[in-house]
Image: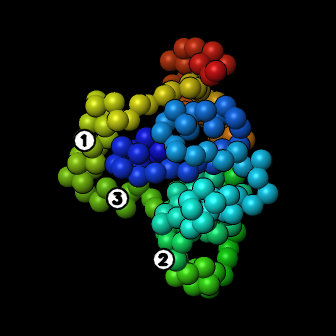
Amino acid sequence: MTQLITHLGGRVIGTTSTTAKAGLAKRAGAAEVILSSAVDDLAAEVRRLNGGQGLPVVFDGVGAHTFDASLASLRTRGHLVLFGAASGAVPPFDPMRLAHGGSLTLIRPSLGDFIADRSELLRRAADVFEWVRSKALEVTVTGRYALSEAAQAHSDLEARRTTGKLLLVPDAAAVGRREETQS
């Protein structure tokens, strides 16, 4: 996502849980990277890095652990795109928090809603393949799991032990165990 946002002219302030992941975020184009364990108030640090202002949009793929900081990092009329739940689902919350935060909006997008018909799927897929072809988007596969190890892949993802893309492959095709492909 960082690669695409910067390719399209945006500025990214990323957050990570490890210094290794911070390096990956910088290489992907993040202007700033915050090590979440190194700050007491993530939203305050985001605002400091953005000249004291909240952000127009926050993309949150972590979920439960980062939701409050993501909301607090937004400017008035900012948008929170909650696209993942690596740390678990966000618990129910009072929607008035969106009003009190400055008329914020929250969306939980689902891929199926953005490929409503075949023509939309083909158009969006063509965009992705063009970004890959032009090197605007470099896809890094860091782990391969046999399909029978899908639970382990999810566990590793949820525990933040992974970076890059993970592939689930048929058991017979699981050449090169995940330990060999991860760095």
How far separated are the C-alphas under marks 1 and 3?
A: 14 Å
Circle 1 is placed at which residue position? 126
Q: In the image, is residue 109 above or below residue 61?
A: below
Q: Which mark is residue 11?
A: none
The type of residue carrying mark 1 is Ala
The type of residue carrying mark 2 is Arg
- Disc 3 to disc 2: CB gap under 8 Å: no
> Can you name the residue that lies furthest to the front here?
51
How far separated are the C-alphas under marks 3 and 2?
A: 23 Å
Task: Let me know if residue 82 appears in the view.
Answer: no
- Residue 164 lies, in percent from the top left, at 54, 33
The type of residue carrying mark 3 is Phe
* Badge nearest the viewer, 3 or 2: 2
Q: Secondary structure at mark 2?
A: strand
Tell me which numbered mark, 1 or 2, is placed earlier along the sequence.
2
Tell me which numbered mark, 3 or 2, is placed earlier along the sequence.
2
Circle 3 is placed at which residue position? 114
What is the count of numbered marks?
A: 3
Going 52% across and 32% down the picture, which residue do you hit?
27
Going 36% across and 50% down the picture, which residue do you hit?
9
Tell me which numbered mark, 1 or 3, is placed earlier along the sequence.
3
**Residue 116 is drawn in which quadrant?**
bottom left
Q: Secondary structure at mark 1?
A: helix
Q: Is residue 122 left or right of residue 170?
A: left
Circle 2 is placed at which residue position? 77
Q: Secondary structure at mark 3?
A: helix
